[in-house]
Image: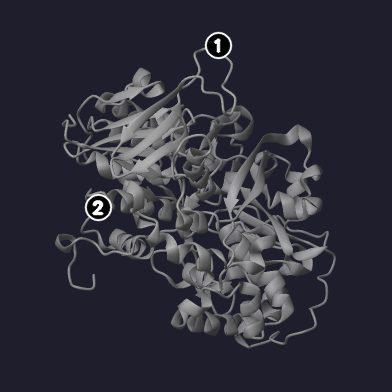
Amino acid sequence: MSLPTAKRVAIVGCGASGMSAAYALSKHPDRFAVTVFEKESVPGGMATSMNIDESKYGAPYINDGVQGCSPAFANTLRMFSELGFEPSEVGMQISFGKGPDFWSNVFPSPLTAHFSADIRKFGRALSTIKALEVPFALLPVHSMLSLFRFSKGFGEKMVYPLVALFFGTGNQTPYVSCAILERVFKDPSMRLFDYNDKSLLASIPKMYAFPKLRDVYTAWQHKTASTDGVTFKLGHEVTRILHRDAHGVVVEYRAPAAPGAEPANPGDSTNTLTEHFDELILAVDADTALKLLDGASKDVKAAGASFMERHVLGSVKYLWDVTVTHADFDYMRKYYETEFREDLAVDPAELEKGKGKGKGKEKQKPKDESQAENGNAGESAGGDGPDDPLAFARANFRPLYYTMQYPENRAKLEMSFDLTHYQPQFRGERAAGPAKEPDSLPLGTARGEGENAEAGTGAGAEDKVVREAQDPASGSAGEEARTGQDEHGKPEPPFEQHVFQTIFLDRDGSSELWTKGKIDNEKIIAERWWKQQSHRWQHYARCVPWMMFINGKKHTQFAGAWSVLNMHELAVTSGFAAAYRLGAEYPFKGDEECERLFRLYLALSHGTRMRKEDRKGVFA
């Protein structure tokens, strides 16, 4: 149990960063008494799962907020593994554009051949940016394209869709920092794709699709709370940070309304409570953190956010996007290339000979766009590309990601996912993924309120969640709808029963271009709005380098992927870093793959190194 002298820590937010901070602190129940506040009734933040009709779509659920990750996401993968969950390997096939603007990382297209000289130059540009990263961090992508004299079409048809795929930036794509673009190609801890001097992207890189995230986060909550050092207050919304001074912080929060009662309106003091803590971790997005801090200055004598906090947190720009989950295969075929087409393929030998490397005029429009061959069978195992890309694509072209640019403005676009291709439960994988048994399950009985207390969060509760997720029977739900096959002969739903997600980006700047109204209403499964961070270059001038000057001040730490780059891996690492600053151990100490990004994040966002006993050298 937590001792009376244990440091009391409040964590606001129960997404990846908040859960990571709580997990690290839970390793020291004698030193920390932690309370985690989350306004939702379940943990996970954006990492959510949603139930769907298994008899119609071939699976009982989808992960609808976060899909998967790169093999470079060491902290995320290690954390999931410790909980008894494993991701599933998937070949990351992408279909960019439509008709003459189509290109893919699976096989070369006329567009790839046309921009072959630009593609080779792009590799040299990445090396230059890496060598001069600091000044290039302040240079947006559109300026970088002009600086290196890339052709306009290359930027519009290849680079902008690629950046939008990485970051979901919509019409902000031209303003993304080119240093961050370089990082996702070159940095071993952040890399999403490998550069290829012929096709731009290395053919079919190996990626991971996450297991059922609702179960992952529930098991994570249970394991964290089982040490008796952490209390989860799910359904409890923090409304203001009232005081931050030498004596600690005072948090104001609203308890859940009684069953049957009307929810409280904003500003209503019903069920409002206050609690004193020694330390505060704000594991929420930047503008929410600023509102909580500045909310204190409205009607009580408190300092609110500092000048530096207002400057740093207020510089983070957010955009509103909407995700439509649907089964409208006609819409997908109309706006994207969903199948292999011979007229959109180029013999790889053409690229080897250096043909099509001119710039300026576009290639002629491919013949008869209506002709398409059915190449929607098979699944890539990921990794290196096949020896014969065209033969492989004819049988195995199965895109996971799609992008489509608006003809009215090619700097703006929308994206779609084929969740049936991406997520393994549609092929019978269990909810835990191809997981091993957990090495050990913690003992103890948790303290908690609300759902946490009712369900129980001790070893027995964790055993049940993990056991059910690892049960092979969890992969059998929906098998009657799997009347198609992948190239391995494994049953999956046919294309006409696939589940798709289309993301319409930047409501305020692009909604007049959206094709959202073209999706058949009868085939819409769900619609969900998201507040997404913009990765414009100003973020790396006004926020990222200044985080170290607000972290640790006034007993407050900030955690969240927004502090650098919107990736699950950075969210996890930021939570570990916040806990580490309070004196907790880094949970994966000694794991070099995990420590690499942790050390980098600690230096960048906290301006410090790992403690002397945790370092292997002076500069480590």
Q: Residue at x 79, y 49 (%)?
A: 515
Image quadrant assignment for residue 216: top left
- Which residue does the numbered mark 1 point to in the structure image? 260
Confirm whether residue 92 shows in the render: yes
Left or right of 13, for residue 379: right
Q: Residue at x 77, y 42 (%)?
A: 519
Furthest-top residue in view? 260
Q: 341 or 527, which lies in front?
A: 527
Residue 140 drawn at (x, y percent): 60, 72
Image quadrant assignment for residue 483: top right
Q: Secondary structure at mark 1?
A: loop
Q: Quadrant of the N terminus?
A: top left
Which mark is nearer the camera, 1 or 2?
1
Residue 64 drawn at (x, y percent): 56, 41
Furthest-front residue in view? 301
Residue 161 drawn at (x, y percent): 66, 64
Q: Secondary structure at mark 2?
A: loop
- Which residue does the numbered mark 2 point to in the structure image? 586
